[in-house]
């Protein structure tokens, strides 16, 4: 082949060079007339002329959209042009702005990118301008409908799928679509979404075309991603729930939405977070599965990255991006309606059945080993909330308070995740190191341990048959990072902050353990042996993870005296060990005397100026006193080296000198307990114990100077110590004094302290230098003896002893001897415990006895009302007629909207009753067509109720007991684990309607055995609850006392309360039913004349050992007398009552 020769100066190389593309800026001119605008936008195949007209129109629209623009002439020009370009026939095939659309079409045919970009630019501006006035909305709707035509859809799809480098075409098209879908409140959102093959084409890809460059994205020139996200958010705002659900099901779009969110400008992130929260999370009409499609693990992880968002500069009073992201994540992860959180079973993993039937013999022989899954979850826990389980490891709770709050909030609503989280995240340990990271992690662990345990360890209304796995429970109480080695090293650390964190964590952990132990020993368990064994195993596991008692004691002793907060926490930790874990506490010999004396010395010396420090020191003292109560070797009346008084007297002095308002109840209880044990005060009922001495000391100190008040403490300590060391001696001396006083004092009683004071007073009087003490005692002793007489001690014997004391007091003028023991003194600083005659209120009962001879106790009417009054459970809420229609089936049943409709059947107004009946039928149909698990039972209940009420509500309300039964039964049928589930379903299958003068399930509950386990009292409590809510009117009262085959209902309820095995809460329910009856016209009279309620209450009170319960019976008798027809009752009883 011959050699080829090139032609021309450059040869073949010149012909193969790429032609240089030059983008020339379009020209423009000012528009001043309608005719001019028409000529500029008329169709032409000349691209230069077309771009000139489009650019002129763009400048014209920009000026109109300017905030400062008030040019009415330009607006009239635009309106005239739109009217002229308006098609003759306004239908779906009409083309608005035909010249503009033809220019766009021609630009697409010839591949002119400038025109393909310029037309969407002016259309976006035009739609934005037309949306600002109602007069121009019709033009905008016509343009939007034109965009939905096939040719325009093809052009839009072509623009959206342009090369990634042609963002100048993609961005204007997305802006135009955003304006179109939001125009006139989303008027064309639905048809635009139907054309999603074109309108949403390449949306996921376009969301990935981000701003490139070192400088921040200009808000006036947003990137293709920004426009794509804003278009997507507008679609979420204006689309219907069904369309929105389909949009959110597009995985590529959902994934692209948040992929680059961390690099987005701040304003776009705010728009995105606000849109997701408003139009997805808080949209009640959007199904849960649609929300969960968006809020997957990847989306949650990307949103959590906004905690470290760096491009935010919020204005004043504007929340930061991190705060907005936190609010969105809190709502998404803690609200079940948002689609992420699933209903768990508490501490029971997904794959186990806590109510599995295991033979009793096998449980007794093998114990917990008979439960195959009990030891299965030490290394891995299967959870229902798998999305959250995968998301939580991406959080950094030690670096951010918000992330720690989010994590603990999720743990609170999904307890199953606690054990799973720490089993799968073992990278961070609790090894003590004083750093910001360790402190953050310690605070997170403290908040986790503080979380409450789930009720019944699960979501059921009662405890399951089998206990939860011990490993899961202990991981919630002491998470895995809190092992014995780490906690012991933290307690012994030289940094007080680290030691304080460890102490506080152990305090809340033991408190939580105490709650768990009580739940394991709840009397309602059917398998008590297995639950008790699980409780013992839980304690053993806790002891293996927590440090020993010796480490706790050494940590307490090493705390500086000035660190009051830390000392209080450490003393509380030791107290909890003695109370909750005595087997651990008693392993070490701990002499609390030295620490107690140090605390007493600090308090008595008044070293603490701040009342808060004083209160903390008192709390520390209370904890040490509680520990001392568990120590049999505590020496209360031994004076140690360095102390002038015994610990008991020092404690008494602390109480007297305490500032006003400081809580001293615990210290008073300890003092009184020791005084009774040491026989310092009389032990008979009604005597206030050591409060007499405490009241006298406080009254004396308040009225005396500090110097004179200190004179009596040594004398008082001497008397108390002698009386405690030899109590029999002073009891015998009191007997001798009574014999000297004569036969009238044979049964008299005074405190042995008074006898000891009488014995020691002569020695003080003869001792040199004690004149100030004698003078102080002359003011103190009359007050003390007068208060003793007020407390019930024998006044004649006190007078006799005081007459002998006067001889040794400073009473030269005889004033003390003449005045004697003061009378009428009252307790000011310490509430005097009620005596036998005044306990529980001290009011006399007018119907308590025949002839008024017997005085009985009765509770104050206000306290009685607070105890026995139950709010009306069927109170009409007419708004329920409207609210239910917008709720999902789960919300209808579980959140009480159906119950509100049912309650309206008892309304006084016939129109409301009829409307409620219609809505109940509609709700029943909606429930039956749903996927609700118990839809058949709920539908059957509502249908039978409607059939029962259909012919009766025209004339009168449906009886309240029937309505109340329906409301309470609704809670049963939606919960298959309820013990009443079989009985309620058996009742519903008997017939299509109910007998309204017969109360449902009364015989089945009171006479028949429970269908599920030992749940008789649980079912009885449910029965009493619905009876209380169903007793509202005189007509309801007739149903309760109507004669029946097995007796009137009231008679059977009163017999039920006589059951000796029935506990106080159920007996109180019976009293609440009676109290409800007294509030109905004629109720008290009926109870008295037909059921002998007064005698029944007297008999119950006479056999009651609890004073507070006895006061309830007395108060209820008073209530019955106050509300009955007293004349009729007197006539009926022939003067036996109320005479």
Image (tube, grey):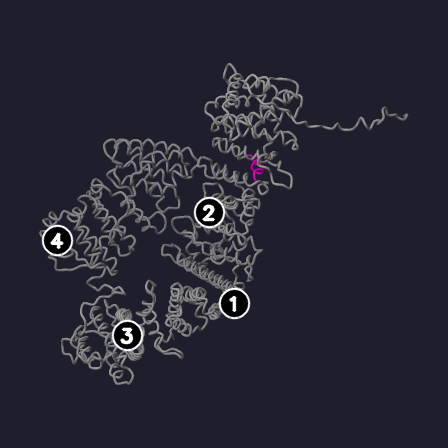
Q: Is residue 254 magenta?
A: yes
| Residue identifier under label 2 | 344
| Residue identifier under label 4 | 1138
Q: Is residue 1041 above or below residue 123?
A: below
Cα separation between marks 2 and 1: 39 Å
- Which mark's residue is nearer the viewer, 2 or 1? 1
Report the quarter where the N terminus lies: top right
In the image shown, does 256 or 1104 lie closer to the viewer?
256
Query: Dot 2: within a 10 Å radius of its alpha carbon, few (fewer than 14), some, or many (20 or more) residues?
Result: some
Label 3: which secondary element:
loop
Please tell me which residue is depicted at 36% across the width and 56% down the height of the picture: 523
Q: Which one is earlier in the sequence, the residue at label 3 or at label 1?
A: 1
| Residue identifier under label 1 | 492
Cα separation between marks 2 and 4: 59 Å
Q: Which one is earlier in the sequence, the residue at label 2 or at label 4?
A: 2
Label 4: which secondary element:
loop
């Amino acid at each position: 082949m011959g050699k080829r020769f090139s032609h021309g100066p450059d040869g073949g190389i010149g012909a193969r060079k790429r032609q240089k593309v030059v983008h020339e800026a379009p020209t423009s001119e000012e528009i001043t007339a309608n005719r001019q605008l028409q000529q500029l936008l008329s169709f032409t195949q000349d691209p230069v002329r077309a771009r000139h007209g489009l650019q002129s129109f763009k400048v014209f629209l920009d000026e109109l959209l300017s905030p400062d623009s008030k040019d009415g002439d330009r607006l009239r020009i635009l309106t005239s042009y739109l009217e002229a370009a308006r098609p003759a026939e306004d239908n779906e095939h009409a083309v608005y702005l035909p010249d503009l659309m033809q220019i766009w079409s021609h630009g697409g045919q010839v591949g002119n990118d400038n025109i393909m970009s310029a037309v969407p630019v002016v259309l976006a501006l035009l739609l934005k301008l037309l949306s600002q006035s109602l007069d121009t909305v019709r033009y905008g709707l016509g343009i939007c409908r034109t965009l939905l035509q096939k040719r325009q859809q093809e052009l839009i799809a072509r623009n959206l799928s342009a090369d990634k480098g042609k963002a100048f075409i993609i961005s204007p098209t997305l802006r135009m679509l955003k304006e179109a879908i939001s125009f006139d409140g989303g008027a064309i959102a639905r048809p635009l979404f139907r054309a999603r093959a074109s309108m949403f084409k390449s949306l996921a890809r376009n969301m990935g075309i981000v701003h490139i460059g070192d400088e921040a994205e200009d808000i006036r020139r947003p990137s293709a991603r920004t426009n794509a996200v804003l278009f997507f958010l507008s679609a979420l705002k204006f689309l219907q729930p069904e369309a929105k659900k389909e949009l959110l099901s597009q995985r590529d779009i959902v994934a692209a939405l948040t992929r680059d969110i961390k690099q987005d400008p701040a304003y776009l992130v705010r728009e995105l977070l606000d849109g997701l929260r408003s139009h997805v999370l808080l949209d009640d009409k959007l199904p849960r599965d649609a929300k969960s499609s968006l809020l997957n693990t990847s989306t949650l992880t990307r949103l959590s990255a906004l905690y470290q968002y760096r491009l935010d500069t919020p204005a004043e009073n504007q929340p930061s991006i991190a705060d907005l992201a936190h609010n969105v994540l809190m709502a998404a992860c803690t609200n079940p309606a948002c689609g992420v959180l699933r209903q768990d079973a508490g501490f029971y993993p997904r794959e186990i059945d806590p109510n599995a039937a295991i033979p009793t013999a096998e449980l007794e022989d093998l114990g917990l080993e008979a439960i195959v899954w009990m030891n299965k979850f030490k290394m891995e826990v299967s959870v229902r909330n798998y999305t959250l389980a995968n998301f939580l490891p991406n959080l950094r709770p030690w670096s951010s308070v918000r992330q720690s709050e989010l994590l603990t909030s999720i743990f609170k609503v999904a307890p199953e995740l606690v054990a799973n989280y720490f089993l799968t995240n073992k990278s961070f340990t609790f090894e003590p190191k004083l750093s910001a990271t360790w402190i953050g992690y310690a605070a997170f662990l403290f908040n986790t341990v503080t979380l409450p345990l789930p009720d019944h360890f699960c979501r059921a209304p009662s405890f399951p048959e089998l206990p939860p796995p011990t490993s899961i429970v202990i991981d919630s109480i002491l998470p895995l990072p809190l092992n014995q080695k780490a906690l012991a090293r933290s307690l012994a650390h030289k940094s007080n902050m680290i030691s304080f964190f460890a102490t506080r964590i152990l305090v809340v952990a033991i408190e939580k353990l105490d709650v768990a132990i009580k739940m394991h020993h709840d009397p309602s368990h059917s398998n008590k042996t297995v639950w008790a064994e699980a409780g013992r195993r839980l304690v053993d596991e806790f002891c293996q993870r927590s440090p020993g008692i010796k480490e706790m004691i050494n940590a307490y002793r090493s705390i500086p005296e000035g660190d009051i907060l830390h000392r209080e926490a450490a003393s509380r930790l030791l107290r909890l060990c003695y109370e909750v874990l005595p087997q651990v506490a008693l392993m070490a010999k701990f002499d609390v005397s030295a620490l107690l004396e140090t605390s007493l010395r600090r308090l008595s010396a008044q070293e603490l100026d701040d009342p808060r420090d004083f209160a903390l020191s008192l709390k520390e003292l209370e904890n040490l006193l509680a520990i001392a109560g568990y120590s049999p070797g505590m020496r209360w009346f031994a004076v140690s080296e360095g102390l002038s008084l015994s610990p008991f007297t020092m404690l008494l002095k602390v109480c007297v000198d305490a500032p006003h308002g400081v809580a001293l109840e615990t210290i008073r209880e300890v003092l009184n307990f020791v005084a009774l044990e040491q026989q310092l005060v009389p032990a008979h009922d009604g005597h206030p114990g050591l409060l007499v001495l405490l009241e006298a000391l406080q009254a004396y100190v308040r009225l005396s100077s500090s110097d004179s008040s200190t004179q009596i403490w040594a004398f008082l300590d001497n008397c108390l110590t002698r009386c405690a060391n030899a109590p029999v001696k002073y009891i015998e001396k009191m007997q001798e004094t009574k014999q000297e006083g004569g036969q009238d004092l044979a049964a008299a009683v005074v405190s042995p302290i008074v006898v000891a004071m009488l014995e020691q007073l002569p020695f003080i009087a003869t001792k040199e230098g004690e004149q100030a003490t004698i003078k102080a005692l002359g003011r103190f002793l009359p007050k003390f003896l007068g208060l003793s007489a007020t407390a019930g001690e024998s006044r004649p014997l006190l007078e006799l002893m005081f007459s002998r004391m006067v001889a040794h007091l400073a009473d030269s003028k005889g004033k003390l001897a003449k005045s004697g023991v003061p009378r009428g003194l009252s307790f000011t600083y310490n509430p005097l415990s009620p005596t036998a005659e005044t306990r529980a209120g001290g009011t006399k009962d007018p119907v308590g006895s025949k002839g008024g001879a017997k005085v009985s106790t009765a509770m104050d009417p206000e306290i009685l009302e607070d105890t026995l009054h139950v709010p009306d459970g069927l109170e009409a809420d007419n708004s329920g007629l409207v609210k239910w229609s917008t709720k999902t089936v789960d919300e209808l049943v579980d959140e009480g909207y159906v119950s509100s409709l049912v309650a309206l059947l008892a309304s006084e107004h016939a129109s409301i009753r009829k409307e409620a009946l219609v809505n109940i039928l509609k709700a029943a149909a909606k429930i039956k067509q749903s996927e609700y698990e118990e839809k058949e039972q709920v539908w059957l209940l509502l249908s039978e109720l409607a059939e029962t009420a259909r012919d009766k509500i025209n004339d009168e309300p449906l009886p309240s007991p029937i309505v109340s039964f329906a409301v309470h039964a609704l809670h049963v049928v939606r919960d298959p684990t309820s013990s009443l589930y079989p009985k309620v379903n058996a009742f519903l299958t008997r017939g299509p309607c109910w007998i309204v003068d017969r109360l449902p399930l009364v015989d089945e509950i009171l006479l028949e055995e429970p269908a599920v386990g030992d749940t008789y009292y649980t079912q009885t409590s449910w029965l009493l609850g619905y009876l209380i809510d169903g007793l509202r009117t005189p007509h309801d009262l007739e149903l309760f006392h109507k004669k029946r085959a097995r007796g009137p209902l009231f008679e059977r309820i009163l017999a039920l309360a006589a059951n000796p095995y029935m506990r106080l809460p159920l007996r109180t329910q019976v009293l609440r039913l009676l109290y409800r009856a007294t509030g109905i016209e004629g109720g008290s009279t009926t109870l008295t004349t037909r059921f002998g309620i007064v005698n029944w209450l007297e008999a119950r009170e006479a056999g009651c050992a609890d004073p507070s319960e006895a006061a309830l019976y007395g108060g209820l008798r008073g209530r019955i007398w106050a509300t009955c027809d007293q004349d009729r009752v007197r006539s009926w009883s022939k003067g036996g009552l109320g005479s």
